């Protein structure tokens, strides 16, 4: 029982702690406001037309809230894991407000709200709806069988996922196969490496062959890149997949043999391996989701959905020039419908067997709303200054696009560098809405955006979801910086090899 004098001692300390926390928040807002103000007032703040262009006015340190959020994702799970699980959404909102409030004060409500609505409505909402749909549908598909996580079985599962990713998307392939991989390796003590290579291959590199595979390629398709043009990335996919699968097989074989020597005994079925698929009707809903993405791209170039004279998509006017395109509305409606149908028609026992929970998609939704909002300055700076970076050669575009796609949303990053390549005035090449682009440059941009999304947990949304599902199933995954260590060891040398083989000339 707490005594009265104890309460008197505790209350002032709690009050002081809250006061100090509020002071830190206010100081953060004040410091961020001062940063923005210095830039705006020094530059005049407005263009000749009276419209503010943030990208031309913001200093590079305006990305501080974005960096702060990334550091929070990296550090809090290590030092305060339970606190982080309960408060990650609050942290995400804190950094968002630390950017948005000073931005609103200094650039004006109209400009700030325009930027917010544009990125939340046109980028974040379609992004999270697609992830939710794929997550909900794939959670009802159960691959049953007697698969044992041997090196050969794991190699086969990773290969299947890599080949599948270009046709159902990296998110779709990841959500379909991560649970079978986890079940097959439930007996293994060392299995984090399996999930790391799964993220490398299935959640990223495997999605390079079609616009369905990864969002950047889909945006390229919307801007005039032929649907099957990205099949030219197959040689890169082959080299990267062969190297990574070989390294994985060598590593997994050594760990597997060590575990057998230590007494681990995987359960093996008598009479061979039997495989079955439960909840197979969800494959229809998965096809609807993939079809909705393709339909959105096809309708974007149909006269019913866009003005042939201006090239502007028809849609619902939202705010100050922000239009929510009808083709996006149609796409999201089909995805939501497919997700709801999956939830209604799939027995709860199947999802329970799949160890399905809504935790991973909830975590992604909470964190990525903050990431999308706080990266507004980074994208604005990139859009304003991308053409002045002096990029002219394929290897430069490969590494510039890839380095930024490792931390920013790779879709708008792809668009910025695609536009930059289109402004170089190529004499011949691929005709797009961004201009004539030399094929080697577009290949470099495409590979950088898709492949290097594997460098961090936030480089591509499936990365974070796969990590969350794995941790939910008891796999001790590398930390944020620990995962980057894996990337530095295995991916960066591979990308240097890509540069020498494909992009040096």
Image: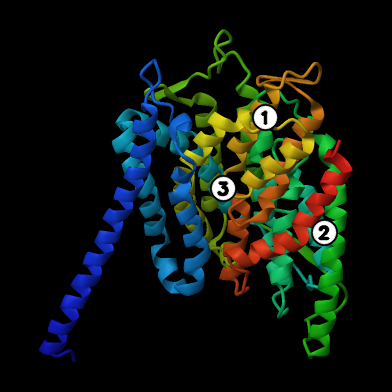
Which secondary structure lies at badge 1? helix
169 or 8, nearer to the observer: 8
Q: Residue furthest top?
A: 309
Q: Position of residue 480 (x, y in %)?
A: 58, 63
Q: Is residue 452 above or below residue 111?
A: below
Q: In the image, residue 52 lies at what x, y percent?
A: 39, 25
Residue 419 against residue 212 in the figure, above or below? above
Q: Are marks 2 and 3 in contact (CB under 8 Å)?
A: no
Q: Which residue is mark 2?
A: 244
Question: Residue 131 has which mark?
Answer: 3
What's the CA distance linking mark 2 and mark 3? 26 Å
Residue highlighted by disc 1: 418
- Packing grade of label 2 (10 A; few <14, some 14-19, many >=20) is some
Residue at 31% across, 50% down: 29
Identify the secondary structure beneath mark 2: helix
Query: What residue is rendered at 57% in x and 55% in y?
Result: 346
Instruction: Classify residue 418 by image quadrant.
Output: top right
Give x and y (percent) for residue 408.
Answer: 57, 45
Q: CA distance from mark 2 to mark 1?
A: 28 Å
């Amino acid at each position: 029982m707490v005594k009265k004098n104890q309460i008197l001692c505790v209350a002032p300390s709690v009050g002081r702690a809250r006061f100090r926390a509020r002071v830190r928040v206010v100081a953060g807002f004040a410091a961020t406001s001062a940063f923005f103000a210095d830039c705006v007032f020094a530059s005049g703040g407005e263009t000749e037309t009276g419209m503010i262009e943030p990208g031309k006015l913001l200093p590079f340190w305006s990305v501080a809230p974005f960096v702060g959020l990334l550091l929070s994702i990296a550090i809090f799970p290590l030092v305060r894991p339970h606190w982080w699980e309960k408060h990650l959404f609050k942290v995400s909102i804190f950094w968002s407000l630390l950017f948005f409030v000073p931005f609103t004060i200094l650039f004006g409500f109209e400009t700030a709200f325009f930027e917010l609505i544009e990125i939340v409505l046109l980028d974040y909402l379609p992004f999270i709806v697609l992830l939710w749909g794929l997550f909900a549908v794939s959670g009802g598909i159960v691959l049953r069988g007697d698969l044992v996580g041997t090196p050969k079985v794991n190699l086969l599962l990773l290969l299947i996922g890599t080949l599948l990713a270009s046709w159902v998307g990296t998110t779709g392939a990841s959500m379909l196969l991560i649970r079978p991989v986890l079940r097959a390796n439930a007996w293994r003590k060392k299995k984090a490496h399996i999930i790391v290579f799964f993220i490398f291959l299935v959640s990223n590199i495997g999605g390079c062959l079609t616009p369905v595979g990864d969002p950047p390629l889909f945006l390229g398709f919307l801007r005039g890149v032929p649907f099957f043009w990205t099949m030219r990335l197959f040689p890169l996919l082959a080299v990267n997949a062969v190297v990574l699968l070989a390294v994985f097989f060598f590593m997994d074989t050594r760990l597997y043999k060590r575990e057998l020597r230590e007494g681990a005994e995987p359960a093996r079925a008598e009479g061979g391996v039997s495989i079955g698929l439960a909840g197979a009707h969800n494959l229809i809903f998965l096809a609807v989701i993939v079809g909705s993405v393709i339909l959105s791209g096809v309708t974007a170039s149909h006269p019913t959905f866009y003005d042939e004279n201006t090239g502007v998509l028809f849609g619902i006017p939202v705010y100050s020039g922000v239009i929510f395109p009808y083709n996006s509305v149609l796409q999201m409606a089909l995805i939501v419908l497919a997700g709801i149908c999956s939830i209604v028609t799939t027995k709860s026992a199947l999802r329970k067997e799949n160890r399905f929970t809504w935790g991973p998609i909830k975590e992604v939704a909470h964190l990525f709303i903050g990431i999308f909002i706080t990266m507004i300055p980074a994208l604005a700076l990139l859009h304003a200054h991308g053409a002045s970076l002096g990029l002219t050669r394929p290897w430069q575009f490969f590494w510039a696009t890839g380095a930024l796609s490792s931390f920013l949303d790779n879709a708008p990053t792809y668009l910025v560098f695609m536009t930059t390549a289109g402004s170089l005035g190529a004499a011949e090449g691929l005709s797009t809405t961004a201009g004539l682009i030399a094929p080697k440059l577009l290949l470099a941009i495409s590979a950088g955006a898709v492949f290097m999304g594997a460098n961090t947990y936030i480089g591509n949304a499936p990365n974070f979801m796969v990590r969350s599902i794995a941790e939910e199933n008891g796999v001790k995954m590398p930390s944020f910086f620990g995962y980057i260590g894996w990337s530095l060891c295995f991916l960066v040398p591979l990308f240097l090899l890509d540069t020498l083989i494909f992009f040096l000339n």
